[in-house]
Structures are given as structure tokens and as C-alpha cells.
Image (spheres, coloured by chain):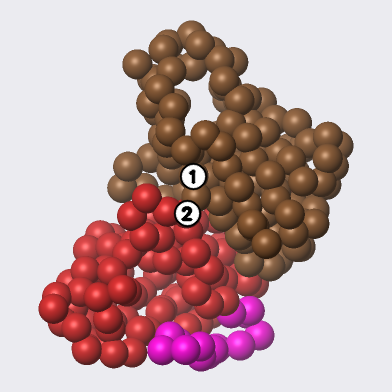
Amino acid sequence: NAGVTQTPKFRILKIGQSMTLQCTQDMNHNYMYWYRQDPGMGLKLIYYSVGAGITDKGEVPNGYNVSRSTTEDFPLRLELAAPSQTSVYFCASSYSQASGYTFGSGTRLTVV
Amino acid sequence: GESVGLHLPTLSVQEGDNSIINCAYSNSASDYFIWYKQESGKGPQFIIDIRSNMDKRQGQRVTVLLNKTVKHLSLQIAATQPGDSAVYFCAEIPTGANSKLTFGKGITLSVRP
């Protein structure tokens, strides 16, 4: 049972480039989330999904997009990378709205 | 043991001592609380949770206390070990539709051998 899997683990982007951070879970969780974590800080919610075909903005959605075509996958898209998007990105999933979240191991992104 | 609020980012304890990590939450509508542990280079890992109809919950070497009157949550770690060194986050979920987990800033726990 892999849990939540994120790829890639590390990436360096140039300003203006685009990329997709992949996230997949094998626990059949309906709820999935994307967080970013800046150095020495807590996690801030970017986007979330309560089920396939449904997504919604979190606290810091600007500069990102998501899609949820299947229960398993929840990719995060950066269209025009900016230095402010340098961060560690965590994907998570949960069985229900009020249950513990399972996190992936993160993607460390640097925009130069 | 020693205790510290979230406004002090680092807690240093002697191996074998008890650790107490405190968290003040602001949303009185929150009814589910979780403590996460994050080791360097890894994602947050669930430690223990508590719902608002309880004031104490115990796990293996960990205890979470909830005081709704003063909106205070604490994590107690018994006989702290070097493997407990990590950043600890409290998180809360309010009642209501579409509520999501909101994280505090985190505290670094450093265990001295």
C-alpha cells in the first residue's frame, strides 16, 4: 500500500516555465489537497477536491491550477513559474472531511 | 519537562525527559484537532487526534489535552527520545461543510542526548 505518491521529488524551473506536479493515492480517498510549505512556516492550502470532477480554491490558489479526473490522481499545474512559487509542495488525501490527512513526501521546487 | 507556545519556535529537551508542546487555536468552531510530526525532508505524519467532545486522549507515549474554554491544545511526549526530534504542528478543522485542515506554524523539538 503506497499511500500518497508525489513526483518529482525535486525540480528547478526557470521563471516563466510551466510544470505539473503529480500526486496519486491508492487508498480510495475522495478528499485530496495541495499544500505549500515555505521555509520555517506551516502549510498553506492551495487547492482541494472533494471527489472526482470537483475542485475548489484554498487559501493561496493564485498561479496554480488543478484537475481531478479520477479518484486517484490530483495534479497541480504551474503555468508561469515565479520565484515566489519556490517552496515545498505537499499533496494529501483523507477518507472524509474530518479525518486525519495522509501526506506525500513532498516536491521541492525552486524557481530561478 | 518544558513547555512552549507556538510563538517560540524551538523546544530543547533532555533525552528521557517529558516534552510538552502547546498550541493556541483561534477558531472556537473547530471540533477536530490533530498533531502532526514532520521530520526533515519528509511530509507531515499523523501522531494523534482529538475531537471536541473529549478533553484528553492517549496514545503510545503521547497524550493530547484539549481545553476548549481557553482554546488551548497540548501534546505531551513521555520519555522523549532522539527519534522524537522533528517539527510538530497542531492542526484544526472547524465544523461545517467544506471545512479544511488549518495548520499552526510549528515548533521544532530538539532532543539532547
Q: What residue type is labelled 1?
A: Gly
Mark yes or no: residue B28 visible: no
Viewer-proximal residue, A34 or B72? Answer: A34
Q: Name the residue under label 2.
A: B43
- Residue under the point 31% across and 81% down: B20
Please say if the residues under marks 2 and 1 sit with CB atoms less than 8 Å apart: yes
Label 1 secondary element = loop
Left or right? Give the position of B55 relative to A54.
left
Picture coordinates of residue A43, whole percent (x, y): 47, 48
Q: In which quarter of the image is the N terminus of chain A?
A: bottom right
Mark yes or no: residue A39 visible: yes
Chain in brown colour: A
- Residue under the point 21% across and 69% down: B110
Q: Name the residue under label 1.
A: A106
Q: Which chain carries label 1?
A: A
Asked if the stretch drawn in magenta spans residue B33, the answer is no
| Rendered view: A88 above or below B85 | above
How many numbered markers are drawn?
2
Stretch of the chain drawn in magenta:
B50-63
